[in-house]
Image (spheres, rainbow, N blue to C red):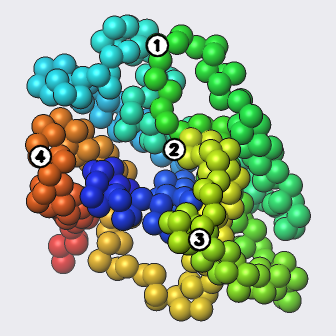
Amino acid sequence: MTLDHFGKPISHYLYQCFGFFSAAEGFFFLSGFVGMLAATSKSGKDPHQSWMRWRAFKTWRYHMATLAIVCIAAATLLPRISHFFDPLYQHPVTGSLWSLALVNTPEWLDVLPLYVLFLFIGSFVFPWFVRAKKLRTVFALWLPFLAIWGAAQFGLRGAINSLFPGWLTHGDFDPFAWQCVYFTGAAVAAWWTRAKTVPGCKATQIVERLTPTVMVALVFCFLWSHQFIPLALPGDLLTSKVHVGALRFANFFAFMMLVCWIVRTWPSALDFRPTNVMGRHSLDVYTAHNFVIYLWMALPGSIRYHGPWNVLAPVLACVALWGLARVREPKPAAK
């Protein structure tokens, strides 16, 4: 995600490199997936999943601190990025209140607010998934999120946003669509946790038998998206990033099925141990990544759009983020 946000030339090769989806789908899907695994393991001591509400509050604080710092810096030191915060400059009081409520989300600062929202909602929904005894119950719990995603394809977000002042910035991600990616990840984790305990589970067997078909579909979408197949690219309704179009969602889910097959077949293949530390400090890393991207946007075009800076800077930024995670690691207790 960091490399993509720096733009070309690196993003030309990395953005949607596997098909009609990007790293953002993986971010939200895995957040829901890992969150459900954590909720399951903590259900004994914390059946109401209050830890999720605390995590949401902590993430909200990180987001608000980032917004305040960057907004002030843009007004005083970094005029090239001040346009991102015009609603706050023009409406300082009401803009601040809407920002506190996560309704006003400037560009590049629109991901963590969604994460806060999904965590908070998940703290009330995940206990239902944890208590579900049957696979069909997990499926039934997931269906409302799918229905909301369906409504998002036909203007739900626009109808809701029309209730707010027109000068607000609502971010690039439709929350009514992207919630389905997050809660699909949670549902998959809950479903698979139960499926493993059922001997000879037919649903598990079907998933495994579908793997070859999924691989063929992934190869086809890869070739199609990169125009190696002479077919017209699908329209925005199917591949929209903002609303998570149907083909985009299906293509990503097929990719995740392939990842799951790799993990089941060769568990160590995707275990990137040197970068595990970044996962343990993901909130610090992602917040720092936001600062880095804004600093990059504040630089003149003679640097941002020309080599070697537009290659060297993204690589150095990733190394710096890894270094930050290493610094954040707790020191071993003295013997």
Upstream in sequence: badge 1 or badge 4: 1
Tag shown at residue 167: 1
At 61% from the left and 21% from the top, the residue drawn is: 161
For residue 90, which quarter of the picture? top left
Amino acid at dot 3: Ile
Amino acid under disc 2? Tyr
Kindly identify the residue that appears in the image at 70 percent across and 65 percent down: 188
Observer-side mark, 1 or 4, equals 4
Q: Is residue 213 above or below residue 44?
A: below
Read off the residue under disc 2: 115
- Secondary structure under tag 1 reads loop
Please, what is the three-letter code of the amino acid marked with disc 1?
Answer: Trp
Q: Indicate which label's residue lies in the foreground, 1 or 2.
A: 1
Which residue is painted at 37% across and 38% down in the image? 108
**Which residue corresponds to the image point at 74% horizontal and 34% vertical from the top-left?**
154
Spatial CA distance of label 1 from label 4 is 32 Å
Q: Residue 276 carries which label?
A: none
Mark number displayed over residue 303? 4
**Residue 37 image position (x, y, % from top left):** 61, 65
Residue highlighted by disc 3 = 229
Query: Disc 1 versus disc 3: distance between alpha carbons?
Result: 43 Å
Helix, strand or loop status at disc 3: loop
Residue 192 in the image: state x and y as whole percent.
72, 73
Q: Which of marks 1 and 3 is nearer the N terminus?
A: 1
Q: Earlier in the sequence, mark 4 or mark 2?
A: 2
